[in-house]
Image (cartoon, grey):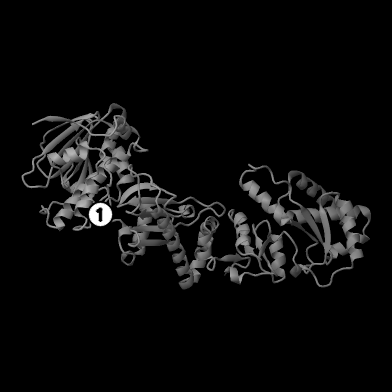
Amino acid sequence: MKREGQIKVDSENLFPIIKKWLYSDKDIFVRELVANGCDAVKKYQSLCMIGEAEDDGVKPRIDVIVDKEKKTLTFSDNGIGMTDEEVEKYIAQIAFSGAQEFLEKYKDKTDADAGIIGHFGLGFYSAYMVADTVEIETLSYKKDAQPVHWESDGSHTYEISDGTRTQKGTSVILHISKDEKDFLEESKIRTVLKKYCKFMPYEIYLSTTDTKKDDKEEKCINDTAPLWLKAPKDCTTEEYEDFYRETFADMNLPLFWIHLNVDYPFRLKGILYFPKQTDKLQVMPGEIKLFSNQVYIADNIKEVVPEFLMLLKGVIDCPDLPLNVSRSFLQNDGEVEKISKHITKKVADKLTSIFKNERKTFESYWDDISPFIKFGCIKDEKFYDRVKDIMLYKSIYGDYKTFAELPKQGDKVYYVSSTDEQAQYIKMFKDNGLDAVILEHNIDTHFVSFLEYKESGTKFIRIDSEIGDALKSENGDVQENNDEIINIFKNAIGIEKLTINAQSLKTSDTPAIITINEYERRMSDISKIYGNMFGSAGPVSETLIINTQNDIIKKIPYLDDEKQKLLCKHIYDLALISQRKLTAEELDNFISTSVQVLGFIG
C-alpha cells in the first residue's frame, strides 16, 4: 500500500539549506550515512544485551555498494531497522533525533551512549547534496514487522509503501545526480571511506555491481579496534610504530608517544606522537586527527588541541565533544576548554616522567622536541610553569643543563645562535674555561626574551654581544696607551659610526673582535623573521674591541703610517669575518688589503 506525506520542517527554506550548506564538504555524506548504519547496529546490540531483542547471531557489518549502471550508491546495515511509524518519525521529521530519543529511553538500562555516534537527526539528509532521489528499504528487528520503502526527490513530499527487504536492517539508496557522478567511482568512494570511516566500530565493505567477488576475497576496509582503544599496558612498541606509519604515512619513526586514556571527568582516548624534526631551523607542522566515537571529525581543531601541540602527530577520540549539527565544528562550551587543558597537562606529565626516570633518554630527544616545548611555553605560560624545571639547554661542550644548572656570570647567561658564525667566540670561551648555551633554532629569537620575562633578574647575552668581565685580563693597559691605539684604528678604518674600544683580554691570540648591540640585534632578527613587514629594524651597532694583549697590536704604534693603515684595516676585516658574512664590497676590500699586507713579506 502506497501513501504520500509531507516532510515536516519549521520553514520552507530549511530543507534546501540542509541539503546544500549544512556540511562544508560534500563527501561528508559518506561519513554520515555510514555512521547512521553503525548507530543502527549499536542500538540492536544494546537491546540484545538487556533482553529487549533476540540476537540473530549475524555478524554486524556495513556495506557500501556502487552501481554505475543504475547510477546508485547504496549504504546498507544489518542493525535495528525501522517500522512504518519509525520511518515517518525519524526520517520525515527532520528536527527529531532518533539517537537522542533512544538514549533517553534506555539510559538506565544500557551503556549505549558510549557507542552511539549520531546525536542529531540531520545526517541522513546530507545524501541530498549528491543525490536527486533517495530511497530507503528497511525492516525492523521487531517480530511480525513488515518491510518499508520510503522515497523522496528532495522536495517537501515523500512516498512510503511496502518494502522488499527480507533481513533486518536498513539500506539507503542514493540516485546520484548528473553533476556528482564522480561519486560513482569505486576509487573515489574508497578514498572517502578511508578518510572518514577508517576506524569506525563495525566492519565496512565496499563493492561494485560490475565486479564479481568471492566472499573469501572480501576485505574489510576499516580497523574496528584502533590502537588508541587498547589499554597502554597492552600495546607493544611495534604496534605503536606500525600505527604511526600507517596513519601518517611517515617512514621516520617517532621519538616517543603519549597514550591518553581518560574516563573522568570526561571520556578521552588517543595517542600523541613526538615526531623527529628533519629541519634544524624550522618547526615542522604536525597533524592531530580528531575523532568522536571512532568517527573522524577533522584535523587540527585548535579549540581541543592547543596550538603548540599541533606540532605533534596523533589521534584524539573524545565522545564528549559538543559538536554542532553537522558534526564538523565545535560548539562553544566550557567542556572543550577543560579537555584542552587536560591534554596539555598530560603532555607535561609525560615529559616530566621521562626526565626524572630516564634523563639520558630525555637528553637524546631534546634537540628534536625543544622547539615544540619552547613554542608551548611561549603560547601557554602555565605549560612553562609545569615544564620549566625539566627544560634543557645544550652547552658549547655538548652536555645538557637545566635552568638551575646554567653557567652564569653574575646575572648573565651567554648563548650562541650559530655555532658556525660564532666559532671564533666559542673558541675564546673554551680557551678560558667559560661556558655558553646553544640556542640556534629560529624560535629561540623569541624564547630568550620570554625567558627574561619569566626569570626576572637573568639576562641572556649572545656570545658576540659584549665582552664580559671573565674575558678581560686582570693586567689592563694604562689609558694613554689605549687612547693611542684607538686613534690609530679610527684614522685607518675611517668608519664614523663604528665604535672602537681597547681592552686587555685573557686570550692573546686574537688581535680584535666585533661585538654588536644585543637589543638592536634582537629587534633586527625579529624583523627579518616577519619579512620586515613592520619596516626594517635598521643597522645594528657594532663595536670593534682591540685586544691590547695581542703582540701584533703592541707593534702597530711603531710602524709607519702606511703599514699602520693596512694592518688596522686587515685586522678589522678579520674581526668582521669572525662575526658575520662580508658584503660583496667588504669582501673585495678584504682581498685587496690582504694582497697589500702580503707585500710586507720580504
Which residue of the protein is positioned furthest toward the left in this rendering? 144
Residue 509 versus residue 53 in the image, above or below = below
Across and down, in percent, residue 266 comes to 34, 59
Quadrant in the rendering for residue 312: bottom left
* Residue 291 visible in the picture: yes
Q: Of residues 362 and 126, which is closer to you in this image?
A: 126
Image quarter in which the C terminus is found: bottom right
> x, y percentage for residue 98?
22, 45
Query: How many numbered discs?
Result: 1
| Residue denoted by label 1 | 113
Q: Nearer the viewer, residue 458 or 219?
A: 458
**Which residue is more in the foreground, 78 or 115?**
115
Q: Residue furthest top?
A: 178
Q: Is residue 214 above or below residue 174?
A: below
The image quadrant that residue 482 belongs to is bottom right
Instruction: Tell which of 398 and 202 is nearer to you.
Output: 202
Question: What is the secondary structure assignment of the residue under circle 1?
Answer: helix
Q: Is residue 337 left or right of residue 445?
A: left
Locate residue 519 relative to residue 124 in the image: left or right. right
Q: Residue at x 70, y 65 (%)?
A: 427
From where the camera sits, is residue 212 visible?
no
Residue shown at the point (35%, 47%) measured from the top left: 323
Quarter occupied by the N terminus: top left
Q: Does residue 284 lie above or below 189 as drawn?
A: below
Identify residue type, mark 1.
Answer: Asp
Q: Residue 283: horizontal and vertical position, in percent?
A: 53, 52
Pointer 1: residues within 10 angstroms few (<14), some, or many (20+)?
many
Lateral position of residue 468 relative to residue 553, left or right: left
**Residue 40 position in % (x across, y down):** 20, 47
